């Protein structure tokens, strides 16, 4: 049974009211890959009555489930609304994989702010919690590429009561508990609040407090903006217990330390909650939701990523702490999938942000917190290669895939999510892992070298082009030995900070010489809030070293850089 989305469905459950109503910019898909479904099921499992309002179009839609006893939870959905609505050329997108029928006509710009406004128009005295990727990465003053200015914290712009950043399970349960018992929302790990004064914070434990440069400072001084970003990155770590404060006018935006990552047992429970793994019939009647097709028969095996790619939001959202599910839990979920009538024998993906980080346990990160050194660049730290059993983690991942394939009813198992090829090359059993990976690849193994020029790759924090070519050669040779036609294809980014005409030509010539095909997966860099690359794009220099970096900001030239690659002949 789905979580209720209409008044009729509330009555079918014999409920008089709901405790929590979650509002999202996506269609309601009851699958753990969708944040609202995951949090909704978790709250339900803890005894709360939960409903979902998906893709509301105004205050009338907000009214339909009544007023919640505890709070409204608001998210733009799985994707930032501005990224969902606009291309890297600032053109309106015509399609949306998270909307029935695929037409991009349901998600407003700056959806979190819009949804909160509609709730406030409808209910005057209800708590509002914002979260998800859009809110999480805008929790402090941030550069907004679409308006080309520094905006205030989305907590202030939306006028919500509290913001949940990162993965929200612990925070959302604590918020529900505190509101239900009439307690203050101060001091909840993984949240941001605002105060008119720093006096009288109601804290349950001791924290260090660090003040970031104020909104007024970062909006008018790029050096201050970079300083604020650097301090935030270096101190947003669960084990450091640091409160970050940024003054906005006369108000203080206060970020509590991140919530601790879930334990393996907690992660196992989360993914075995009673999801239907289907689109709610109300939304399915309006048309198919494309986003479910790529994840319906996929398995999340790992959460978090320590890749620290400059352009990626995962580090600031899921943190660098990697948590893997138990093999037993994964096998149990596979058994659930095999019983679905739509299942025809193929598990399309076993992975996460980076699939082959499954099982990795860094003794330093887990006890002292993230090092200032990057785990994978300029080279792979040896502590990033060890699994829970102290064996080679890359080989452990292959063993997991083999166990999944042995489940009755499963014919094929593929790895469709990200792979860090540098991790595999650095492992003890690289040849075994690469050879085995051939058997779990559906035709093409998708890797993301992102560029080829050494300078651009350094700024991106990506492994060298030589490593990509080495992995490609060994993978395709292994496939040939097995009599299989399987290949490695690359994803690339152009117009990233550091890339000018010279670097773009270098990439073009690299592709011509080494790949032998015209790449279709080429995207123009989009400066999204919360990433190192966006900070460099806005300021023109590296916030950690102060090194000036070339940035191409002209849309016409950015488009031309892409054309130079995809029109390669």
Image: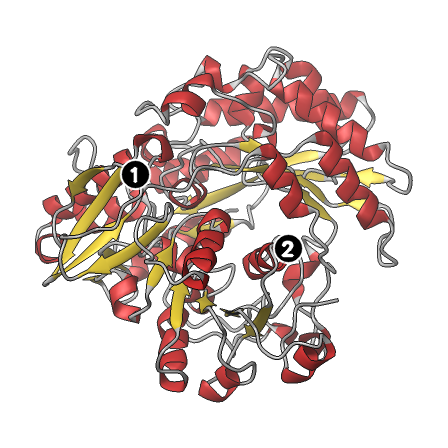
Residue beneath disc 1: 205
Q: Position of residue 421 (x, y in %)?
A: 55, 27
Q: Nearer the viewer, mark 1 or mark 2?
A: 1
* Residue drawn at 36 percent across, 67 percent down: 90
Q: CA distance from mark 1 to mark 2?
A: 28 Å
Tag of residue 359: none
Residue placed most toward the observer, 14 or 211? 14
Q: Is residue 12 above or below residue 45?
A: below
Of all residues, the one furthest to the right in this rendering is 408
For label 1, the SS is loop
Tell me which corner region of the image, top left, top right, bottom left or bottom right, holds residue 277.
Answer: bottom right
Q: Is residue 188 above or below residue 315?
A: below
Label 1: few (<14), some or many (≥20) within 10 Å?
few
Label 2: few (<14), some or many (≥20) within 10 Å?
some
Tell me which corner region of the image, top left, top right, bottom left or bottom right, holds residue 11.
Answer: bottom right
Tell me which corner region of the image, top left, top right, bottom left or bottom right, holds residue 350.
Answer: top right
Q: Please tell me which of labels 1 and 2 falls first in the chain.
A: 2
Residue beneath disc 2: 45
* Residue drawn at 16 percent across, 48 percent down: 225
Q: Is residue 474 left or right of residue 316?
A: right
* Residue drawn at 63 percent across, 53 percent down: 32
* Residue 446 appearing in the image: no
Residue placed most toward the observer, 157 or 41? 41
């Amino acid at each position: 049974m789905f979580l209720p989305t209409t008044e009729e469905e509330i009555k079918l459950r014999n409920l008089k009211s709901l405790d929590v109503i979650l509002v999202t910019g996506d269609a309601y898909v009851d699958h753990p890959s969708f944040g609202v479904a995951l949090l909704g099921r978790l709250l339900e499992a803890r005894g709360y009555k939960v409903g979902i309002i998906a893709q509301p179009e105004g205050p009338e839609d907000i009214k339909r489930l009544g007023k919640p006893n505890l709070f409204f939870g608001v998210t733009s959905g799985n994707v930032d609304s501005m990224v969902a609505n606009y291309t890297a050329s600032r053109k309106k997108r015509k399609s949306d994989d998270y909307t029935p029928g695929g037409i991009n006509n349901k998600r407003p710009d700056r959806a979190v702010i819009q949804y909160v406004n509609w709730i406030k128009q409808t209910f005057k005295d209800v708590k509002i919690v914002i979260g998800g990727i859009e809110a999480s990465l805008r929790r402090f003053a941030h550069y907004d590429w679409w308006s080309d200015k520094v905006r205030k914290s989305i907590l202030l712009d939306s006028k919500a009561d509290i913001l949940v950043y990162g993965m929200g399970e612990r925070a959302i349960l604590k918020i529900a508990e505190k509101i239900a018992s009439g307690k203050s929302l101060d001091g909840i790990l993984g949240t941001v609040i605002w105060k008119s004064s720093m006096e009288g914070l109601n804290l349950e434990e001791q924290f260090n407090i660090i003040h970031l440069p104020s909104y007024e400072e970062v909006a008018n001084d790029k050096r201050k903006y970079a300083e604020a970003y650097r301090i935030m990155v270096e101190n947003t770590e669960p084990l450091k217990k640091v409160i970050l404060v940024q003054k906005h006018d006369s108000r203080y935006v206060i970020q509590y330390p991140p919530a601790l990552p879930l334990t393996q047992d907690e992660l196992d429970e989360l993914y075995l909650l009673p999801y239907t793994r289907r689109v709610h019939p109300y939304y399915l009647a309006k048309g198919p939701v494309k986003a479910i097709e790529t994840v319906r028969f996929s398995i999340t095996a790992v959460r978090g990523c320590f890749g620290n790619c400059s352009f990626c939001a995962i580090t600031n959202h899921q943190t660098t702490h990697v948590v893997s599910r138990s093999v037993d839990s994964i096998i149990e979920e596979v058994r659930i999938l095999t019983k679905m009538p739509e299942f025809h024998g193929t598990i399309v993906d076993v992975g996460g942000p980076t699939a082959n980080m499954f099982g990795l346990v860094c003794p330093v990160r887990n006890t002292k917190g993230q090092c200032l050194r990057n785990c994978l660049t300029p080279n792979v730290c040896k502590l990033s290669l060890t699994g829970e059993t102290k064996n080679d983690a890359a080989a452990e991942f292959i063993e997991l895939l083999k166990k999944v394939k042995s489940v009755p009813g499963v014919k094929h198992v593929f790895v469709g999510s990200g792979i860090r090829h540098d991790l595999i090359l650095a492992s003890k059993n690289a040849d075994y892992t690469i050879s085995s990976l051939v058997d779990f690849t559906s035709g093409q193994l998708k890797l993301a070298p992102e560029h080829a020029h050494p300078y651009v790759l350094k700024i991106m924090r990506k492994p060298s082009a030589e490593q990509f070519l080495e992995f490609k050669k060994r993978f395709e040779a292994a496939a040939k030995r097995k009599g299989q036609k399987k290949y490695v294809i690359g994803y690339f980014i152009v117009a990233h900070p550091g890339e000018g005409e010279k670097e773009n030509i270098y990439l073009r010539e690299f592709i011509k010489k080494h790949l032998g095909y015209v790449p279709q997966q080429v995207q123009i860099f989009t400066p999204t809030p919360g990433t190192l690359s966006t900070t460099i794009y806005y300021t023109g220099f590296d916030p950690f070293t102060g090194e000036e970096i070339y940035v191409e900001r002209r849309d016409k030239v950015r488009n031309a850089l892409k054309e130079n690659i995809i029109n390669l002949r």
